[in-house]
């Protein structure tokens, strides 16, 4: 599937296994639906991307336990098989977050930045 609109995407996020390219929105939506996604970062060594920012981002997210990464097809297949066999291993407490708190914090950061710029 080349593209899923938001409604189609969110309808799939309650499945036992969720996989994604390195897309922060898909990762966030997956976690909001209670699933730790299996993420496949693009590899610039294979000509899939211009640099390694996706790999660095995924390494950081995986180190925090927010995602599981697959470096290659064999790892991906193994992780999907594991997620389908034991979906509870990929369940997380749904990350609804406090939107109002996040917006207020972001607003404060922007205000501080603008104040410093004069």
Image (cartoon, rainbow, N blue to C red):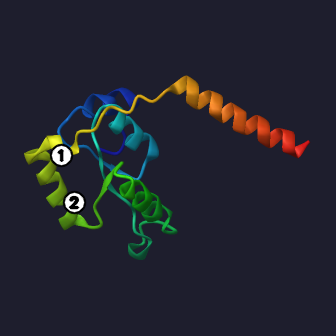
Neighbours of disc 1 within 10 Å: few (<14), some (14-19), many (20+): few
Displayed quadrant of residue 5: top left
**Residue 113 picture location, percent across and down:** 78, 43
Instruction: Quickly name the residue at label 1.
Output: 89
**Residue 47 picture location, percent across and down:** 42, 72
Decide: is 109 above or below 97. Answer: below
Q: Residue at x 82, y 39 (%)?
A: 114
Instruction: Quickly name the residue at label 2.
Output: 76
Decide: is 77 above or below 16. Answer: below
Decide: is 1 above or below 60. Answer: above
Of 31 and 63, which appears nearest the observer?
Answer: 63
Counting residues from the N terminus, which is met first, the one under dot 2 or under dot 1?
A: 2
Q: Residue at x 69, y 31 (%)?
A: 107
Looking at this view, name the residue that lies furthest to the right: 118
The quarter in which the N terminus is drawn is top left
Of 43 and 99, which appears nearest the observer?
Answer: 99
Q: Residue at x 29, y 46 (%)?
A: 37
The quarter in which the C terminus is drawn is top right
Tags 2 and 1 touching, CB below 8 Å: no
Looking at this view, name the residue that lies furthest to the bottom: 45
């Amino acid at each position: 599937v080349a593209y899923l609109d938001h409604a189609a995407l969110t309808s799939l996020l309650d499945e036992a296994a969720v996989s994604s390219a390195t897309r922060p929105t898909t990762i966030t939506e997956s976690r909001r639906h209670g699933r730790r996604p299996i993420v496949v970062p693009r590899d610039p060594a294979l000509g899939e991307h211009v640099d390694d920012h996706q790999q660095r981002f995924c390494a950081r997210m995986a180190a925090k336990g927010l995602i599981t990464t697959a470096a290659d097809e064999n790892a991906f297949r193994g992780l999907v098989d594991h997620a389908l066999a034991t979906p509870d291993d990929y369940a997380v407490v749904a990350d609804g977050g406090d939107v109002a708190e996040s917006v207020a914090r972001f607003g404060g950061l922007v205000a501080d930045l603008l104040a410093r710029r004069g």
